[in-house]
Image: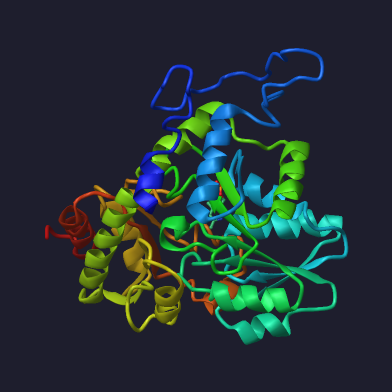
Amino acid sequence: MHFSTLAAQIGCGWDTTTGAVSVPIYQTATFRHPGLGKSTGYDYSRSENPTRSVLEDAIARMDGGVAGFAYASGMAAVASLLLLFKAGDHLVVTEDLYGGTYRLFEQDFTRFGLAFSYVDTTDPATVEAAIQPQTRGLFLESLTNPLLKVADISTLAALGKRHGLMTIVDNTFLTPYLLRPLDLGADISLYSGTKYLAGHNDTVCGLAAVKTEELAEKVSFHQNAAGAVLGPQDSWLAIRGMKTLSVRMDRQLANARKITAWLCAHPLVTKVHFPGLPDHPGHDILKKNGKGFGAMIGFEVAEPGLVEKVLERLRLISFAESLGGVETLITFPALQTHADIEPEKRERMGINPQLLRLSVGIENAQDLIDDLSQALSGEAA
Ligand SMILES: *Cc1c(COP(=O)(O)O)cnc(C)c1O
């Protein structure tokens, strides 16, 4: 079945009692047992809830995994998956990691005896050099924020396998529509479903898919034990969003291409970071591993003073955190997502005070370009 068919059909035909096309929201904490030692398959909603089960089945199928899991947020997914490790274990991690993941690793999990090395995962040799005798996992982002660096998941997963490591990929920026980490050899894929998967900036959720039954059993145990599960209402919203994932992303990708071309030609834009550009260092890797370059764009304006003006003048595009929704959003990484990183390190990573990040939505591309145009130059396009 093609991706768009699978997506549109999520939950359809599931309710054989009523034939409801849209999966019902099972707003219940518990379930009546038919008798002693008997169960309908559902006992208590932390363990399993029918609405959540449909969502979990959907992410498993989209990602080609044996099982899927839904959590209260992307961070809840990461925290729950880290319970697969134990004190003394070491993980090699993408250096320009999502800020919330970095905070969780450094401020929480290090207190429980986990250790992390943050390296440039665009270079497999650097990753291999960081592997120690206690290393048990690779935690990668397939496409990073805000410089859109690309990790070669197939090469790194093979490397991980050689060293007996578990490879976990945060694939939030690409989604299974554009790249499937499990097909490329990873053990677990995970998502902030808040972003492209749910796609409407209206719910916070986390999703994961796993490659083997053995892992499914372990991840399921920790999901139930720690309990940061997604509620039935939010599961329904995520399902509703995922049904249109491919349609939304096709439009977002097309818009991103048009906006990138326009930005590249603008005299006040000095640099554009977009993996769809042939000279982007990750272009060929994404071409090999995936089906598209995403709809996130980083761009640098001619001087830092222009940043504030652009953010003030934008009328259509919202200055707001998050990404992946139908509405186009802009952020200023140096002061928002990456504010906690020391200035020199930030600068070394390439996150300078001229850098803005655009999450391209599904609006008309020309309207977005007109808004950027008047914001950059101070006059109508
Ligand atoms: C947003 C995000 C997260 C965290 O997800 P939440 O749903 O906000 O908890 C993790 N990884 C990446 C790449 C993200 O963009």
Q: Residue at x 29, y 56 (%)?
A: 250
What residue is drawn where x is 60% and y is 52%? Answer: 209
Colour style of the rendered protein structure: rainbow
Q: Could you tell me residue 357's position as x and y percent? A: 39, 62
When the figure is inspected, residue 223 is found, relative to residue 367, above or below; the finding is: above
Residue 16 shows in this picture: yes
* Mark count: 0
Find residue 8 and report its image quarter. top left
Task: List x then y, in percent, for residue 43.
Answer: 71, 23
Image quarter hosting the C terminus: bottom left
Where residue 370 sits in the image (x, y, percent)?
A: 16, 57
Q: Is residue 17 left or right of residue 161?
A: left
The reply to whether residue 328 is visible in this rendering is no
The spot of residue 364 in percent (x, y) is 19, 51
Q: Is residue 283 above or below residue 89?
A: below
Which residue is rendered at x = 64% and y = 87% of the image? 125
The quadrant where residue 186 appears: bottom right
Q: Nearer the viewer, residue 28 or 234?
A: 28
**What residue is shown at x 39% (from left), y 80% (from top)?**
280
Q: Which residue is situated farthest in the left direction here?
A: 381
Q: Name the residue nearer the viewer: 180 or 122.
A: 180
210 vs 199, left or right, is right
